[in-house]
Image (spheres, helix red, strand yellow):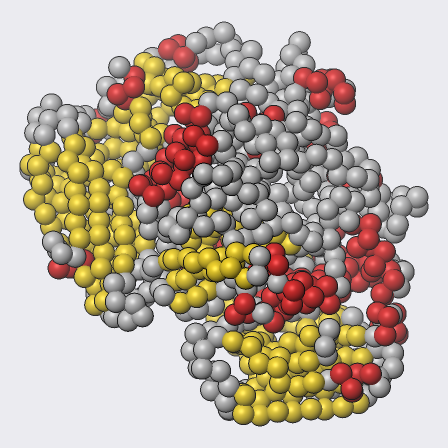
Amino acid sequence: MMKKIVRLVAFVFISGVFPCSLSAQSVKQVKLVNFDLQSSSQVKADGPELSTTHYQSPVYWMPVKVPSTVLTGLVANHIYPDPYQGLNNMLIPDASDQFNKEYNLEQYSHLPNDPNPWKKPYWYRTTFKVPAGDKGRHFQLIFKGINYRAAVWVNGKQIADSTQMAGMFADYNLDVTNAVNAGGDNALAVKIYPLDYPGYPAKEQLKALGPFYENGGPTGDVGKNVTMLCSVGWDWIPPVRDRNMGIWQPVYLRTTGAVTIGRPKLVTDLPNLPDTSVAKLSLNLTLSNHSDAGQNGKLTVTIKPENFAGLPMQFSQNLTVVANGATDVSLDAAKVSQLAIQKPHLWWPNGYGRANLYRIRLQYTTANGIADDTSFVFGIRTVSSKGTMVVDFLRREFFVNGKRVHLNGGAWVPDMMVNRDSARYDYEMHLCRNANVNLVRIWGGGVTPPDAFWNAADKYGEMVWSDFWVTGDTQGEFKGSPDWPLEGNIFVKNVTSTIYRIRNHPSLLVWTGGNEGHARKELYDAMRDAIINLDGTRPYIPSSSGFAKLPAGWKGSWPDDQASGVYSGGPYNWQDPKVYYKKADVGGDWVFKDETGLPSQPPYTTLAKTIPNLVWDTKLPFPLNNTWGYHDAATGAAQFDNYISEMVTRYGQPATMVNFSDKMQLMNAVGYQGIFEAAGHKLTETGGVMLWKLNAALPSVVWQIYDWYLEPNAGYYAMQNAVEPLHIQFNQNDSTAAVINRMHHATGVLSAKAEIFDIDSKRLNSFSISHIGFADEGTQEVIKLKEALIAAKGVSFVVLNLTNAAGKTVSHNVYWLAPGNNLTELNNLAPTKVDVKVLGAEKGAAENKWTIQLTNNTGRLAFFVRPQLMANGEEVMPSYWSANYFTLAPHESITVSVSAPVAKLGGVQPKVLVEGWNLEKQWVGLGTK
C-alpha cells in the first residue's frame, strides 16, 4: 500500500503558489521549519508514538531550523564547535569507527557510551496546524532532499519507510491526505538514517606544506552510497564528520484540491535558426485525480514576462480526469496558437546578451474552484553541441540560440555542511556574473544543488554543466569500484528525480555522466537513456575528462555519439603565463580544458577569519603554522610550497602579513590572467577553459576566485578583465598585443595604444594603431612590442588601452615584467595618490549602487589600486566591483561601479576605502544608505 503513496516529486516550484480568488480554499505550500532533533539512541519511543501531538519526551530535544544536517543542528546547539574554523573539526568524532580510533576522536562523542554518534538514526520532529476550512482537501508532504535514508510518520501513521526514501538527490512527494487532521494539531516524525557505508577518510592534513592524501579516502568506499562523495574528504575539504546525514533540503506541506498538476515539461524551440523571430513552445504535464469521482475541469495557462516589460498571454483547455486516474496533457504550437511566440525575448548566457525570463502559471479549475495552481520561470533558448577532431583530440563546442559560446568558468563545489541558503546562492551567482563567468560546473563528487541555485543561475545568465554523482576516485577509474554504488536502483531513482526537477531551467547547458570516470554499464545506460527520454533538449557527454575512455561498445555523447571532447588534468599549481600560452598554442587537451587552476590566497581582509591562529611557526615559511595545512596549504596538486617560494623569488621576502597577502594577490592576478588570456588568444580554436575551481567549501587558501566569506581575490578581477566581451591583452611569449572580441556582432572602429613605463614611471615608448574592427567573434594581433622590451632594463610596465570610435576606453590592461622575473624593485615603487570622486548613487530595493571615478593626476604610476566598500569598519561582502586591483598610468582615470546587497549594508552610511601598492589609505564617503 505504501508504494502507492510514495513517488518521486512531480512538481517544479520556483516562486510559490498564487492565491485563489475563486474559492475560499486556496492552493497553499507551507514550509515546515521548526523541528526538534535527537539521536534514536536517546529516544525509546517509535515512529507512531513520536508522531502524536500528545507525545511528551523524557529527554531534551534540540531545536533546529530545517534544512539542517544533524551536525549543523548540533553545532547550532553548541554541542560541537564550528568545524569550519581552525582545527575544530578534530574535536568532533567521525562516522568511521576505524578513523575515530586512529585519531582518538571517540572521546568527543556527545552521546554517553556511544563513541560514534553517527551510527544510529536521528529523529526530527515537529507539529503544525491545518485550518478546519481545509477539510476535504488533498495534502502532500514534500521532502526536497534527505541524506541518506528516511522514514516518515504523520499523526501515528507511517507514510514512507527507509527503502522508499533513499539517496541524497531525490525529492519525495508523500500523500498524507488520510493522515492530516484538518482543524487541529498535527505531528510529523522523520527518522533519518546515516549512510549505509560511512566511508573511510584519508589521513588528516595536520601539517602545513605536508602532502595531500587520497581524494575520497584510500579506498573510495564512500562511493558505495549515492551521496555527496566528497563528504569523506578531498584535497580541498576535510571529512564531514556526520557525512551530512539529515534533512538537508526544505520540507513543505502542500494543500490542493483533488486534482494536482505534475511533472510539467516546457520545451522551447527556435525552428528557423539563425532567424530567431519566432519561438515555438511545447508543454507536457500530468493531471492526477486523487479522488473517487471523475473530475471535469479547465487547465488555464498564462505566460508573462518575468524580468522585462511585455504583455501576458493566456489560453485554456477543457480536460477530464477519471477517478483515481491521470491524464497526460501534451500541447504545442500546432495545437495552440499562443504557444508560437512572435519576436521572443531570448535567454542569453552572460556576456552574449540579456538573460530574459518568462513565467508560466498553470491552474486547473473544477466546479469547486481552483484545484491546483503552480508556476515556474523559464527562458526561451536552444542549446546544442558538436565535436571536431583537432589533430588527435576531439574538441567539444557548445551553441546557444545557434551562436557558439566560448565557455569561461569553473567547477562549483558544495558547502562543507551544505549550509547555503537562497540568499547565499544569489550572492554567489551574482559574483560569478560580475566576474564575467558564463559557465558553472556542478562537480560530480559534490551535490546537485537545490532549486535556489538554479533560479539564481537562470537570473544571472550562468550556464550550468551538471555532473552526476560519479568520480574516478570512487567508481574505479583511479580507485574505488565500478560495482559502486551497491544499490543501482537508488542511483537510477535519484537520477530520474533530478532530471524531472531541473530540466526546465534555461541555465542547464549539458548533462555529464560523472567526474573523470563512469558508472558501471547498466547505470551508465540507464542514466543516458533517462536524459534522452525525460529531457532530450540538451547535450549529454559521458565524462568531465576525455582521458577517462569509454569501454568499447558503450554509447558516447548524445546526440552525436562521440567522446566527451573535454579534458581535465590541470595544471593545478601556479604557472607562469608563458606556460599557458604554450599549452594553448600546442592545442592537445587545451582544445577544451575543463580543469585548471592555482592556489589562491585570500586578501588580508579575511585572513584572520580563514586562519584564526595567526602565530607564525618559524619552522615554516612566513607566516604559516600548521593550521594553514588544514585549510589546504599543502603540497599535492596545488603545490602551495612552490606558490610561496615563487612569490618570494619574484617579489622578495614579505615583511608583514599584510605584505605577504598583497604579494600573493600579485601571484593570483598574474596566474588567472595567464589562464584566461592564453585561452582567449585561441578563442575560435578552443571550446572553453574552466577552473578547478570557482568557490570554496570552507575557509581555504587554494583554488578559488572568491573565498568562503565571499571575498574576491585579485585573480577574480584578473579573470573579470581577461574575459570581458571586448579585450586587449599582451602575449608574454612573443610580446605582442592583441584584441579579442567575444561578441557575435560588429565592434565598430577601434583604436589600440600600448605604452611602456619603467620603475620610475618614465614613459619609454608609446605605440598606437587605429582602424581595428571585428564583424564577429575573433582575435587580432595589433602591436608588436618585442624590440622595445628587449631594450628595457629592470621592471617595466606595459599599459594597454582599447578605445572605440567615440574615444571611450572599452578595455584597460596592465602588465609588470622584468628580466628573469626579478620584480623586487616593486618594493621600492615611489608613493603616489589618486583623486576619488563619487559620480552617482542609486538606491534599490535589493541592492544599492555607486559610480566612482579614480584619477591619477600625478606623474607616477598608481599600482594595484584596490577600492573596498566598507560598513561598520569592515568590508562589505559580497560587493560587486566592475574593476579592482587595477593600475593607472600617470594622468590616467578610470570610472568603476560597485553594488552591494542592502541586507549586507547594515543600515549605515557606507564608505569606500582606497588602498594600493604605493598608495596611502584614503577614505571616501558615499551618499546612500
Hey, which residue is sitting farthest top in the picture?
Answer: 44
Can you give x and y, in whole percent of width and height, for residue 168 in the image? 47, 31
Can you give x and y, in whole percent of width and height, for residue 308 in the image? 32, 66
Residue at point 9% right, 41% down? Answer: 319
Q: Quick one: 503 or 530, which is closer to the camera?
A: 530
Residue 456 visible in image? no
Residue 123 visible in image? yes
Residue at point 30% right, 67% down? Answer: 273
Q: Quick one: 32 or 638, which is closer to the camera?
A: 638
Residue at point 16% right, 57% down? Answer: 333
Q: Quadrant of the N terminus?
A: top left
Can you give x and y, in whole percent of width and height, for residue 763 in the image? 78, 89
Hey, which residue is sitting farthest right in the picture?
Answer: 618
Determine whether 876 is above or below 236 in the image. below
State left or right for residue 611 relative to residue 64. right
Where is residue 348, by image quadrant? Answer: bottom left
Can you give x and y, in whole percent of width and height, for residue 436 in the image? 54, 65
Where is residue 728, by image quadrant? Answer: bottom right
Determine whether 166 is above or below 394 in the image. above
